[in-house]
Image: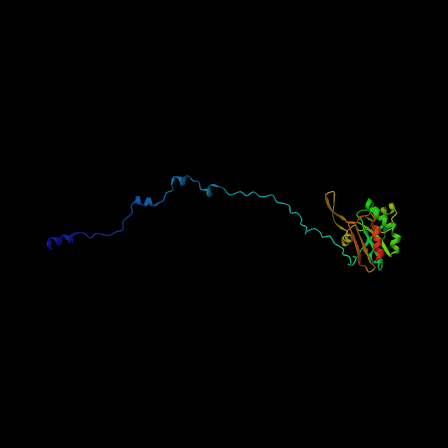
Amino acid sequence: MSKKTHKKSAKSPIAKVTAPTASKTAVKRQVAKPTRSEAAKPNKTSTKGPTKVKASPAKTAKPSSANRKTQMVLEEGSKAPAFHLPRDGGQTVSLKDFAGQKIVLFFYPRADTPGCTKEAIDFTRLKPAFAAAGTTVIGVSADAPKTQDAFRNKHQLSVPLASDEQHDMLEAYGAWGEKSMYGRVFEGIIRTTVLIGTDGKVVRVWRHVKVDGHADQVLAAAQSV
């Protein structure tokens, strides 16, 4: 190599290697811009207001059958529940008053109504026959003692008429419960008759009694015990 050539090469500057700088135009292109179609679409989440929930009217809870008072059921062979009640004539009557005797308790819905009147008259008519069988007959309702007095006097009844205005005895003997009449449901006395033996235990129970001929059926049962 000649001296001239060597001098020229020594004078030429060394090229610097640097990372290419992106132009402003290129940077702008890197930022994605929404298209016209995208910009025209409304934001569903932001445009709509809070969803309104219509409150349903509160329903009144109906009392379940579990909350209702369970009707007592008197079983045959069980011990007769004790009782002490006022009766017609200003006296009282108790189960213990007839210890060692047979007792017939007939529960009737209301004094001086047609069915109850017939039933009480039938038991009064058969009272001597019951007495001969060693059996005392007692009528029971929720009527007041004064009402029982008027009932007795009007129809010349001779059987004791007890008043259970608080329904304690009626419930204990299963004679108080739910009834229906003309589409109406209510609680009241269920016409029932109970025969109690000399040992104080229930011999027989008649529920939902039909009045016609009933007193005669009870007499036959008392005579057979």
> Can residue 97 be seen from the camera position used here?
no
Front residue of 69/184: it is 184
Please state if 9 lies on the left or on the right of 117 as rendered: left
Q: Position of residue 175 (x, y in %)?
A: 77, 51
- Label count reads 0
Going by the image, does 221 lie left or right of 46? right
Q: Quadrant of residue 184?
A: top right
Q: Residue at x 12, y 53 (%)?
A: 5
Depth check: give the residue in front, 149 or 132: 132
* The N terminus - image quarter: bottom left
Say which of 16 and 143 sits in front.
143
Image quarter (top left, top right, bottom left or bottom right) of the C terminus = bottom right
Give residue 137's position: percent from left, percent from top: 85, 53
Residue at x 31%, y 45% (from the top left corner):
26
Residue 97 appears at what percent x and percent y? 84, 57
Rendering colour mode: rainbow
Residue 218 shows in the view: yes
Q: Residue 196: where, in percent of width, then height?
A: 81, 57
In the rendered structure, the answer to whether residue 8 lies left or right of residue 26 reads left
